[in-house]
Image (cartoon, helix red, strand yellow):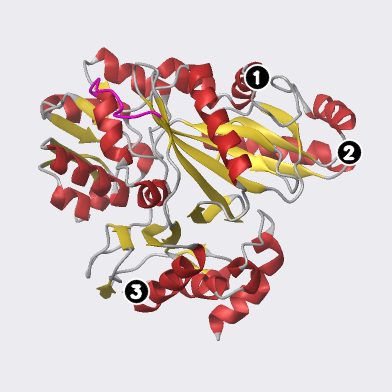
Amino acid sequence: MFDKILIANRGEVALRVIRACRELGIASVAVYSEADADSLHVREADESVCIGPGPAGESYLKIPCIIAAAEITGCDAVHPGYGFLAENPDFVELCEENDLVFIGPGARVMRRMGDKSLAKQIMSEAGIPVIPGSRGAVADAAEAARLAGELGYPVLVKAAAGGGGRGMRLVQSAAEMENAFNTASSEAATAFGDGTMYVEKAVIEPHHVEVQVLADGDGRVLTLGERDCSIQRRHQKLVEESPSPLLDDETRNRMSEAAARACGACGYRNAGTIEFLVDAEMNFYFMEMNTRVQVEHPVSEMVTGVDIVREQIRIAAGERLEREGALAPRGHAIELRINAEDPERDFQPNTGTVSRYVPPGGPGVRIDSHLYEGYTIPVFYDSLLAKLIVWDNDRAAAVRRAARALDEYVIDGVVTNRGFFRALLADPDFLAGAYDTSFLDTRMETLLAAAGD
């Protein structure tokens, strides 16, 4: 097992990894920007190193600074969390060159799965259903239009190196293609340094369902059930729950088997997520693989009892999974992403100082957060403040518990989306589990009105 791990991240996920390290008897090192000097993850780590100014490009994305921080503190491993450098294969290789174990998959697998068109090809060859589309990169808007004519509109133009909805556009007709393609490509080049695009058939009114996997160095794979992430705004997930209210047992089993097969097809090791789109007829299609721990991993932890971050560390240290196969979810879990956003101003991010902070408690309630009274939210980073995760015996009870926890949750001094979630949890169709990825597009005005009452 490792002696000391550097956490190449910030905020709640850094705190999550620090806690896992402490339970394993491993010393932890936090890195932080000047803007994060007072962050809770810096206080809780055994050691900390400042790596630069507030902007992420001058601190959390500065690979030489992170490698140097690991070396001067005597670390033997690095945990990337999610975001920032978590899916950067160059960072993985530099860790290895400096005798640091990267807690995640290898660089080759990360590159192959990070190229969305190549990943689809690998999965298709492994017999996993994929969405019909281009077999590789598309050169320009004219080629994209030709392919779209063959596939049939609507189609999606997507960044090969993309994620989080950036570099992606829905195209309804040939007349829209040139502008959509060029805009998406430019957006992808800015966000990911790669404007390469591909085209795929749009699945109408799909559910976004993903399977959590753990895979060790001996080829053993454990699947931890699925998470439904269909409540999204502009392709950004807001709510995740497990199990999905959509799936039947037969589809759930087939999807879990496909996820395990996907790990074998790419030689995957460590924690990851296989993302699928599911249509109304229960057909599911591989969308992408996330080669890291995800924001919503606590949902799977709550319904399976598996500590995913601890397993990440164990696998990276060369230990075997204690079991393989599929774990069926027990009960129901829901995660709400509490963001520093103003729903009444088109979810505009905001900052401020937390003047009062009272997290909810009680049975089946978990808060993953780096907030405390007096904490000032920096302007440089993602607006995520906390994750409220609840568990109960069934979905209806879990929704009621989530509503109760929201009512108890106090974050004063900054505007959040807490009221928006309270309205969502009371929506009849959400309560019935009758939603897909277009749900918020059609309900936003109603939910905002209810949140303001």
Q: Is residue 214 left or right of residue 21?
A: right
Instruction: Provide the residue designation for mark 3.
Output: 409
Distance of mark 1 from mark 3, alpha carbons?
45 Å
Choose the circle earlier in sequence order: 3 or 2. 2
In the image, residue 193 sits, relative to residue 444, either above or below, namely above
Q: In this view, does 448 lie to the left or right of 310?
A: right
In the rendered structure, find residue 452 and report the number of the disc placed on it. Answer: none
Residue that carries the numbered disc 2 in the rendered image: 174
Q: Residues within 10 Å of mark 1 (few under 14, many from 20)?
A: some
Q: So how many labels did they put on this image?
A: 3
Please give left or right for residue 219 compared with residue 69 in the image: right
**Type of amino acid at the residue the image marks with label 1:** Gln
* Predominant secondary structure, magenta span: loop
Q: Is mark 3 on a helix, strand or loop?
A: loop
Q: Magenta stretch: residue 113 in it?
A: no
Q: What residue type is labelled 2?
A: Ala
- The residue tagged 1 is 121
Over which residues does the magenta segment extend?
317-324
How far across and down, in percent of the image, does residue 43 sit? 14, 52
Instruction: Tell me the quadrant of the picture where the C terminus can be found.
Output: bottom right
Q: In the rendered image, which quarter contains the N terminus? A: top left
